[in-house]
Each structure stands twice: as structure tokens, then as C-alpha cells.
Image (cartoon, grey):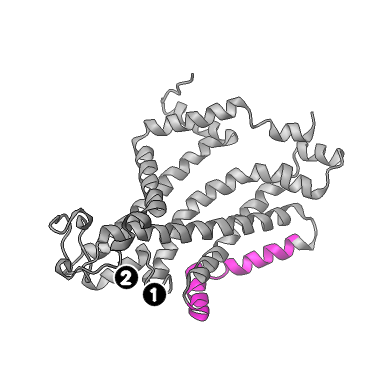
Amino acid sequence: MSATAMTTSADTPETKVSRFQVLRLISRDWLALAAVIFLLIVVGCAVFGPWLVGDLIDKPNFRARNMAPFDLSQGWTYVLGADTLGRSLLARLVVGAQNTIGIAFCAVLFSVVIGGMLGLIAGYSRGAAGTMIMRGADIVMSFPSLLLALIVLFSLGPSVTNLVLVLAITRVPIYLRTTRAEVLEVRERMFVSAAVALGANHRRILFRHIAPMVLPTLVTIGAIDFATVVLAESSLSFLGLGIQAPEFTWGAMVATGRGYLSTAWWIAFWPGLAILLTTLSLNILSSWRTYADPQQRWRIELARSKKGIPEKRK
């Protein structure tokens, strides 16, 4: 059997069926299903929200200043209340989802790509290159991530580009070290030795045979880390070092409403609740990503059988 056939053997009809099994299992778990539905709503707001309610986020309505939630006297768009300028909180939550999710997605994507590439090199290389990469990761990890982000943003100035850059840099060592650990184990497997015997070059071995084996782990960590990046971005925006006005995120909305907690608590409550539910949903759903990995799914099925939960098979 060739190395290519051995690496592609995992992509079989059985694996495809198991992916449908994941969806069926999630549909049976009301908590995971609620997390999926909420995340789909958040993504829908991020994609279509600015087009639907974009005109309301900057439109002041002084008759609705600090209007309490669930008062429909000004229309359904004010169901969550209004801020100090009478702007609809529902509209600002919907549009703020685009900036919050967009910044977190770009930061996680860049950190996965950069950390994964460096981790592949550090794990596969047996020379000084791998050592230098790991020492650089150790230097980055020696600084507290939030403190490093504060220093960089204070020096370079707050902007979307700098925010994405600093969030990505602080998360790169996580993916780098994980990828390196995976590569150190995978490179000793039989299919890698077969690829070397067949004359495959290092680039083909690394990106065609080893990288697909590491990718599921990076996707799982990325799903978990996405929630952490959302919290980090919200913290920086709350401190005034994130995205700047007139643009805003959920963290910036919380910072705006913190001065009115005693008189208009809803200004800070709704964006804070959105951050809480988004990160909670991501953490709940990330555990289900293990079912998509055939090498790890048996562990969950074994734990279910020990608890006396029968596994239905078709």
C-alpha cells in the first residue's frame, strides 16, 4: 500500500457516516443543540446584521434616551432598550457582532496558520531551526498575554489591524507547541517511513502526509481558543485599547454602559450577556468536535458505555 493510499484511508464512507452521526448526537443533546442554534444566530447577525439594521446604530432618538427594555413604544427595534443617545441596543448588538466575531476569527485564523506552519517546521526539523523556533515561542509565552497586548497597543496605537496582530501573536505559541508535539509523534509512523522510502521530498511529506493528521487537533483547539480571543478582545475594548469610535464591539458597548449601571443597567448588561453566551456556546460545542476525529471518538463512546448509556447504531 502506498503512502498516499495510507493517508487517505481515513476519508472513507464510514468516516462520512460518522459525521452525520455527530449531527444526530448533537440533536439529541439539548444543551449542544442550543449552543449550535445560538452560534448560528450570532453568525447570521455578523453577516446580515449591518445590512438589516445598519441605519439604526448611529441614529439618535432623544425621546428614547435610556429607555428601559421591553418597551415597544418606539418600535420593535427598541425591545432591548436604548443607550444614552437613544440608539437601539438591539441594532448595536447585531452590528457589534460583526466586529467582535470578525476580529476574533481573523486573530484565530492567523494564529492557527502561523503557529501551525512554525510547529510543522519545528517538529519535523532535527536541526537548529526547530530549536530557534521553540526558544522564540518560549519568549512570547514568558509575557502575560494581556499585558503584552496592552504594551503593544499602547505603543502602536489602537486599531483593528494592530488588535488582530497582537491577539494572533499572543496565541501563536499555543498552536506552535501543540503542532510540534503532534509532528514529533506522527513523523515516526509507518506511512511516513513508506513515503521516505518511495522518494517523497520533505515538503511533500510535511504538507501532504503529516499536516492532514495534525489539522483536526488544531481545529479543536481553535474552537476552544476562539472563546478566549473573544474575551481578550472584549477586555481590550473595555480598557479603550480595542476598536475605536465610531466603530464598536460588544466590549466597547460594556465600557460605554459601565457609568450607567445604577440608572440604566441594560446598556452594559445586554452586550455582556452576548459575550457570556457566545463564549459558553463555543466551549460547549468544542467538546463535540472530538466526535469528528475517528481516533478519539472511541474514547467518548467507551465513557458512555461505562455510564450505562447505550450507543445506538444504524
Left or right, 17 with reference to 95: right
Task: Determine the image quadrant of residue 285.
Answer: top left
Residue 208, horizontal then vertical, whole percent: 73, 43
Q: Are marks 2 and 1 in contact (CB under 8 Å)?
A: yes
In the rendered image of this protein, does residue 240 appear above or below residue 89?
below
* Magenta highlight range: 130-157
Quarter of the figure that contains the N terminus: top right
Q: In the image, what residue type sits under mark 1?
A: Gly
**Residue shown at 43% from the left, 74% from the top:** 241
**Residue shown at 50% from the left, 40% from the top:** 289
Residue located beneath label 2 in the image: 255
Residue 130, horizontal then vertical, whole percent: 74, 60
The mark nearer the N terminus, 2 or 1, is 1
In the rendered image of this protein, does residue 223 appear above or below residue 34?
below
Q: In the image, what residue type sits under mark 2?
A: Ala
Q: Quick one: label 1, few (<14), some, or many (20+) residues within 10 Å?
A: some
Residue located beneath label 1 in the image: 240
Task: Determine the image quadrant of residue 60.
Answer: bottom left
> Does 139 appear in magenta?
yes
Q: Quick one: label 2, few (<14), some, or many (20+) residues within 10 Å?
A: many
The numbered dot on residue 115 is none
Which of the pair 176/45 is nearer the observer? 45
In the rendered image of this protein, does residue 85 appear above or below residue 302?
below
Left or right, 139 with reference to 200: left
